[in-house]
Image (cartoon, coloured by chain):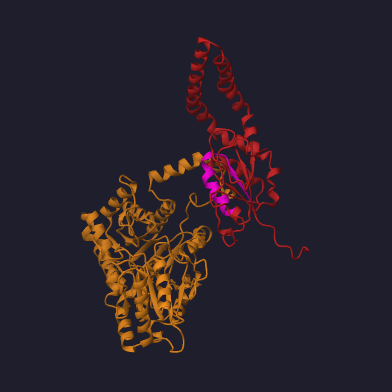
Chain colours: A orange, B red
Amino acid sequence: MSERPRLLYLAYYFPPSRASGVFRARATANHFVEQGWDVTVLRAPDRFFYEFVGSVDEALNASVDPRVEVLQPEMDYFAWDNDLRNYSFWRGNFPVLAQKRYQRRLDRTFPEHYVTWAESAVATGRRLHRERPFDLVIATGNPFASFWAAWQLERRTKVPFVIDYRDSWTLDQFENADKFPPGHAAWKWEAEIHRTAAAAVHVNDALRAWHAAKYPDAADRMQVVLNGWDPDIMDAEAFAAGPAEDRPLSFSFIGTLTHVQPIESLLEGFRLMGAAGAHPGAGLDFYGHIGFFSTQEMKLRAQLGLDKAIPGVAYRGPVPKSEIATAYAASDVLVFLNGGSKYVTTGKVFEYMATGKPIVSVHEQGCAAEELLRDYPLWFEPASLDPVHVAAAMAEAGDAARKADPGTAARARAYARSFTREAALAPFERWARDLVSKGR
Amino acid sequence: MDATTAPPAPDRVVVVAFRKAAVARVNGYLDYLLSRGVRVTVLVGDGQGWKQADRFDPRAEVLSLARRENRRPFVWTYTLLVERGPGGVLRRAARLPGPAGGAGRRLVRAHAKAVRLIRKWFFWRGYKAVRGHSLRRLALRRLEPLRLDDATRVVIADTAAVPFGWSLARRRPGLEVTRAMDVSAYEPLPVTDPAPEQGFDLSPDPRAYTQL
């Protein structure tokens, strides 16, 4: 191909946001630009991240390849803006009519508040396409309004588009149930978008299979692009082989704590392990944010039982992605605390494996991540979420950390090397390049 | 204690609720704030459409616009001509002895039923469109009792109160006027005045609040 192919990437959550899906979006943009594409990212405006969500990690901006062009289409903050000082004359004096008009707009277009951003993204995309045509549009959801924007762009510009499901849209991944009642517009839109998308990308095979069964006509256009770990953020080879003999072990959870994780089993299992005399003085450290939104943090902290002092347990707070290796280096055993569903992999499991340290699972059996952990030589899985079983698995993982066999750690890291972001994205990028060259 | 060592005055929040539907949500918010020592004043427009509404948390100061709202010309004329006037005459007729009294009692019941339907299908259809504006007028003339100078924020609990909140925000740009019942600012405060375990008796009482 003589000219660099041109990609328009619709990624609402993109640095400086620290939302969990940002790392996949960042890696996708970086990988495509590295492989010779001209990449333009359309993301949410700064005002949304700073004023309404408040979950920002500015260090992430530096991790985006400078060749990636990042634009911020504007949006309407009707659903988020609660400050009456910002209300227009219309909304301030006729709030019911304003709400009805806003709802009608959603009913006419797409049933998500983010649709106003998607409308701007379509306008921006069309303008850029007129200046220099795009070869491919990739939209990542959530929000799924980005899928709608890609679909609109395809209708108007005939540029093929790919939808990338970081999460499922209509399936509740944790409850394995429909997210919307029958007849909801989301069903119509998902079917329509699948009908015209060049491909639908999923993060694990269980999600691909569920969508393939739901939309059989599009099944042959579905593929899996796993998440992965980012070698540019974490130097896996730098981790020591094991803890120093003279200090107590540190069991760590690194990631975002949410209400779906079985934290009670973990806390009680940790207590039982200590009570049984295994690994005296061991600590359980939590690194990361509590909840995805700053406004929920205190409430969730109380819900999780982390608002009061628990012997040996410490909440160490959020760690910027650029310093995440420090948290891993301070940990001897990694606790994979997860909501546990066959549809949920989580990106953290790849980072955990990259360290070559013992990993103890604390989640319901049948979690999608088990498929990946099964061949990891330092994985410890409790028989159930019963705290007694969790305590036994933690003690075993602690023993492995104390033993610190360099051979096993090297095998573990070698296994993890096959799960870098690059490795996950490479086949997808090749497929995208083929698709674009056929279209030229 | 001198001025330099005096602890800062606890926050004060003003909550504005003009619709009965907001009571449960407001009470949840009030409980959170009042338990943590935050002072709260509730401005309530409970003149029309608040029948059988629960009361607000008794720890809060509640100021009512009910008497003022019920004296608005449209409301007063409607209630006099359709509800209280004919109702009073018929109740007197119902007290008459013999068959006239029986007929009077039947008319009282028929009138009560008709009033419910007229209120639902005619009165509310017209009045709800202008109620927020009418209450705004009343409330803006009575800002002094709200003591907004020492209020941290004003929380607008329902859509009927938005016109008042919007005008207030225009008059006092330095004051935070918001629709969000955000408790995050008060989460670090210890609980100093918890509600009793069995909860407060919030059963309806039309004379519970200070009238403005």
Residue range (magenta): B13-33
Q: Nearer the viewer, residue A32 or B110?
A: B110
By secondary structure, the bulk of the magenta-drawn segment is best described as helix
**In magenta stretch: residue A21:** no
Displayed quadrant of residue B203 = top right
Quadrant of the image containing the N terminus of chain B = bottom right
Q: Residue at x 52, y 67 (%)?
A: A308
* On screen, residue A60 above or below A87: below
- Please name the residue shown 33% across and 67% down the image: A345
Q: Is residue A1 visible?
A: no
Q: Quadrant of the C terminus of chain B?
A: top right
Could you tell me residue A393's position as x and y percent?
34, 76
| Rendered position, A329 above or below A147 | below
Report the side of A174 relative to A51 (left or right): left
> Residue A169's quadrant in the figure?
bottom left
Q: Quick one: A426 or B132, which is closer to the camera? A: B132
Residue farthest along the right direction in this orientation: B2
* The magenta stretch spans residue B16: yes
Please provide percent x and percent y for residue A168: 33, 58
Q: Is residue B64 above or below residue A314?
A: above
Q: Is residue A322 left or right of residue B192?
A: left
Q: Viewer-proximal residue, A156 or B205? A: B205
Residue A385 in the image, given as x and y percentages of width and height = 34, 68
Judge whether residue A253 can be spotted in this image.
Answer: yes
Where is B55 relative to A199, above or below? above
Q: Where's residue B118, x and y in %?
A: 49, 24
Count numbered badges in the picture: 0
